[in-house]
Amino acid sequence: MDNLVIMALIATLGTWLLTALGAATVVFFKSPNRNVMNLMLGFASGVMIAASFWSLLQPAIERAEETSKLPPYLVVTAGFLSGALFMWVSDKVVSLSRRKADSTLGKPNERINRIILLILSITLHNIPEGLAVGVAFGSLQNSDYNIESLMGAVTIAIGIGLQNFPEGAAVSLPLRREGCSRKKCFLLGQASGMVEPIAGVLGAILVVYMEALLPYALAFAAGAMILVAVHELIPECQQNQRTQPYTATMGIILGFAVMMLLDVMLG
């Protein structure tokens, strides 16, 4: 069982590394190209939406049918809504902190306030992503380590790692635009992914020792990821839709297709 937790830790360290690689793009770009950023954020959205179904909700339904005394649709729906509610409450906490900072720091510190909010937002995004990877590896205890279930967990880690790259850039590049040094931009950008190994280990431990939580935990992670994708990433990548109407949309389609391909082909 401990091996599964270690595997989850290694996998989430890998997704953290890809966040750091995304943050490192600040070394090459002084400011982000809007079209490239929209494409990358759209790709991240597509990956998260596809992963929410193929890698989380579908396995949650299957597990609930096998282990739960309650109807599977109730378990999965409750988990999904709880995950979305968790992210909604988290967003409200960030918004409240921002308003307090505005009243305390005043107008001259508006730039600092924007930076803090940006880092907190991306960090919150990474909590359910790390949880999803941890849950995927923790669930291997019930599959006798067969290659299909192992590759399914690896696929989730790969998909989340892929979408972490643009998220790392989404932190570091705007910070650079605000006037921060490249070193500081990189350090803050990669730091936003540090919660993933913690959440990954926690998710694996909960599933390993509390099997009944697996369907609920999978659906919880899916709900959180869908809310983040729909409420945060998709609106952000559609900001210059008038000049480039299909750039972000094609990014979403491509991200969904890549994640679906990886999951179906490898899982």
Image (cartoon, grey):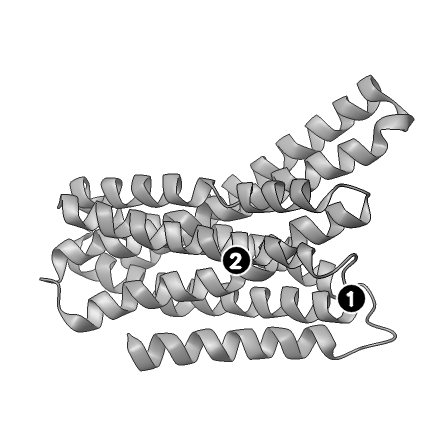
Q: Position of residue 133 (x, y in %)?
A: 35, 54
Classify 92 as above or below 28: above
Q: What is the three-letter code of the residue carrying label 2?
A: Asn
Report the side of 129 relative to 87 (left or right). Answer: left
Classify 137 as above or below 48: above
The mark found on residue 33 in the picture is 1
Report the side of 116 relative to 105 (left or right). Answer: left
- Say whether marks 1 and 2 touch (CB < 8 Å): no
Nearest the viewer among 212 and 137 is 137
Classify 210 as above or below 145: above
The numbered mark, 1 or 2, whose residue comes first in the sequence reads 1
Residue at x 34%, y 79% (from the top left corner): 264
**Location of the C terminus (image quadrant):** bottom left
Nearest the viewer among 57 and 105 is 105
Classify 210 as above or below 142: above
Residue at x 13%, y 46% (from the top left corner): 1
Residue at x 29%, y 56% (from the top left corner): 136
Q: Position of residue 88 (x, y in %)?
A: 58, 42
Residue at x 30%, y 77% (from the top left corner): 266
Q: Position of residue 36 (x, y in %)?
A: 72, 70
What residue would you read off at disc 2?
A: 164
Res. 232 visible in picture = yes
Nearest the viewer among 206 and 71 is 206
Query: Label 1: how many residues lie within 10 Å, few (<14), some (14-19) or many (20+)?
Result: few
Res. 57 visible in picture = no
Q: What is the three-letter code of the residue carrying label 1?
A: Asn
